[in-house]
């Protein structure tokens, strides 16, 4: 059964070819460089990785490397809840757009949802800065 959920798409335009952006972001070990919610990688097996998290180890299952810019992943929290995170790198002219879909999970307050959105915006701004400095 699928429950109705509020979602917000948060995006950043990056003045780099989408293939460059995807090549930088697709290795799971690169996520902690720009995604502040993940600490250093502790271990991995296939597409399943364990990272240091602020509240203990966090397990993340990543999409396999692909030709479509898909960076979807599932985050298993220490409390046992798993969160699906759709993430895409999309060609936009000579640059690219990185789009993160933030779902509001059941019981999440307006304040927490807004705070999570701001967190994602900061992470995407960091990704943009890193990639545009390299380019």
Image (cartoon, rainbow, N blue to C red):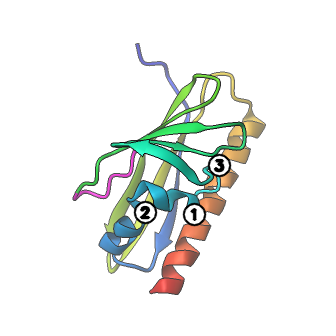
Question: Residue 23 placed where, x, y %?
Answer: 34, 68
Element on which disc 1 rests:
helix
**Mark 1: few, some, or many residues within 10 Å (few <14, many ≥20)?**
some
Question: Residue 37 placed where, x, y %?
Answer: 64, 50
Element on which disc 3 rests:
helix
Task: Please say if the residues under marks 2 and 1 sit with CB atoms less than 8 Å apart.
Answer: yes
Point out the frontmost of discs 2 and 3.
2
Q: Earlier in the sequence, mark 2 or mark 1?
A: 2
Residue 20 is at least partly visible in this image: yes
Q: Is residue 118 above or below residue 112?
A: below
Q: Is residue 114 above or below residue 88?
A: above
Residue that mark 2 sits on: 25
Element on which disc 2 rests:
helix
Dominant SS type (magenta): loop
Residue that mark 1 sits on: 34
Q: Which residue is located at x 60 percent, y 50 percent? A: 38
Residue 92 is at least partly visible in this image: no
Residue that mark 3 sits on: 117
Asked if residue 15 lies left or right of residue 105, the reply is left
**Mark 3: few, some, or many residues within 10 Å (few <14, many ≥20)?**
many
Location of residue 110 by image quarter: top right
Q: CA distance from mark 2 to mark 1?
A: 9 Å
**Which range of residues does the magenta coloring cover?**
67-72
Q: CA distance from mark 2 to mark 3?
A: 20 Å
Question: Residue 18 placed where, x, y %?
Answer: 33, 70
Residue at the farthest top position: 1
Look at the image and say whether residue 70 sits in the magenta stretch: yes
> Which quarter of the rendered picture does the C terminus lie within?
bottom left
Question: Residue 44 placed where, x, y %?
Answer: 43, 44
């Amino acid at each position: 059964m699928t429950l109705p959920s509020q979602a917000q798409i948060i995006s950043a335009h990056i003045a780099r070819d989408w293939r460059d952006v995807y090549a930088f972001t697709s290795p799971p070990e690169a996520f902690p460089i720009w995604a502040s919610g993940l600490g250093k990688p502790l271990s991995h097996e296939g597409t399943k990785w364990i990272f240091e998290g602020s509240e203990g180890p966090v397990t993340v299952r990543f999409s396999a490397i692909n030709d479509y810019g898909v960076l979807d992943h599932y985050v298993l929290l220490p409390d046992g809840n798993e969160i699906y995170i759709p993430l895409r790198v999309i060609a936009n002219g000579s640059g690219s757009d990185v789009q993160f879909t933030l779902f509001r999970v059941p019981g999440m307050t307006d304040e927490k949802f807004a705070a999570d959105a701001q967190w994602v915006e900061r992470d995407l701004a960091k990704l943009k800065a890193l990639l545009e400095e390299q380019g």
